[in-house]
Image: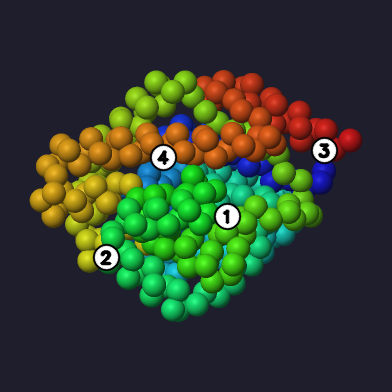
């Protein structure tokens, strides 16, 4: 059998971890986590990272291997995954990658152009814009300079917008063009099975998961990370709303409501992104046996 990476994309809250863990047990393989928020060991609750039971059942890579103060990037993830896969394939010709970080997943599957260094003067220019005009000024500039990035990146994250702007102006190329380079050939096969649910059911699961996070101690986890709130790792759904509550900008109930709303928005954004990928075969995650059967049939084709 040719070495094969089974890729399981899907929106947040759909049930990727449970499905991937069961599939990995069946195939006797290991899992590569492609959720950039779960990289950080201090953010277990707010990112719904795999628990002790799942980690004990199947080995997961790229879960809790960084501190929030560590620098990491899409290109480093691509490099590290491609370096890891040969060792995984040496013991099993199949590996699984699952998660919700779209750009990170695309980098492994498709590759990405090397992003050039940026001009410090350009960065200072846009930092000044952020200071004077706020995040809305950055959004307007990005929409004008790189509409594709405007439609894809997190518009509530000023660091992401600043990064796109400074790369676009410094390089003379839209930031999005570095992420849509010609597909690089990999020396392993890729099978993509997308996991989804009926929208109402997905939203119900998201709401229940947020309630469970609060019960498990999201508030205490966010308090312990408040001193790092300016770091990019913490500028994300769940923590951002907790910090607003701590600052007195919203009530506790409002913060929880906002986490649920913003998580649902993120799930829609994930699906919009992946719906552009014609290589993904979509399944309702509740139809487990159908998905497993389809994957195994593809693996058998790979043997012929």
Disc number at residue 45?
none
Q: Is residue 223 visible?
A: yes
Image point (57%, 59%), residue name: 174
Image point (69%, 25%), residue name: 293
- Residue marked by disc 4: 266
Name the spot of residue 206 as percent of width and height, x first.
35, 32
Q: Secondary structure at mark 2?
A: helix
Image point (68%, 51%), residue name: 110
Res. 9 image quadrant:
top right
Alpha carbons under labels 3 and 4: distance apart: 35 Å
- Residue marked by disc 2: 132
Mark 4 in CB contact with mark 2 (< 8 angstroms): no
Res. 255 image quadrant:
top left
Q: Secondary structure at mark 4?
A: helix
Q: Secondary structure at mark 3?
A: loop
Disc number at residue 176?
1
Alpha carbons under labels 4 and 1: distance apart: 19 Å
Image point (14%, 53%), residue name: 246
Alpha carbons under labels 4 and 2: distance apart: 28 Å
Alpha carbons under labels 3 and 1: distance apart: 33 Å
Name the spot of residue 121 as percent of width and height, x first.
44, 78
Q: Secondary structure at mark 1?
A: helix
């Amino acid at each position: 059998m040719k070495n094969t990476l089974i890729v399981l994309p899907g929106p947040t809250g759909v049930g990727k971890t449970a499905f991937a863990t069961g599939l990995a047990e069946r195939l006797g393989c290991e899992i590569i986590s492609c959720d950039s928020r779960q990289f950080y060991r201090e953010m277990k609750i707010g990112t719904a990272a795999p628990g002790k039971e799942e980690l004990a059942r199947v080995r997961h890579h790229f879960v809790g291997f960084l501190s929030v103060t560590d620098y990491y990037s899409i290109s480093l993830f691509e490099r590290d995954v491609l370096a890891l896969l040969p060792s995984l394939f040496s013991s099993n010709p199949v590996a699984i990658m699952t998660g919700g970080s779209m750009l990170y997943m695309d980098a492994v599957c498709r590759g990405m152009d090397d992003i050039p260094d940026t001009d410090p003067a350009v960065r200072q220019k846009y930092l000044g814009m952020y200071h004077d005009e706020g995040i809305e000024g950055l959004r307007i500039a990005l929409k004008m300079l790189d509409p594709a990035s405007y439609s894809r990146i997190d518009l509530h994250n000023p660091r992401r917008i600043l990064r796109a702007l400074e790369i676009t102006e410094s390089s003379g190329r839209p930031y999005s063009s570095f992420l849509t380079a010609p597909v690089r050939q990999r020396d392993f096969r890729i099978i993509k099975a997308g996991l989804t649910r009926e929208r109402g059911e997905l939203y119900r699961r998201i709401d229940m998961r947020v309630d469970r996070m609060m019960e498990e101690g999201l508030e205490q986890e966010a308090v312990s990370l408040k001193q790092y709130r300016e770091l990019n790792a913490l500028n994300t759904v769940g923590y951002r709303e907790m910090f607003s509550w701590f600052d007195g900008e919203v009530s506790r109930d409002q913060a929880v409501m906002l986490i649920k709303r913003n998580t649902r928005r993120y799930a829609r954004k994930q699906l919009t992104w992946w719906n552009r990928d014609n290589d993904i075969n979509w399944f309702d995650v509740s139809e487990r046996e159908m998905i497993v059967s389809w994957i195994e049939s593809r693996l058998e084709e790979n043997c012929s």
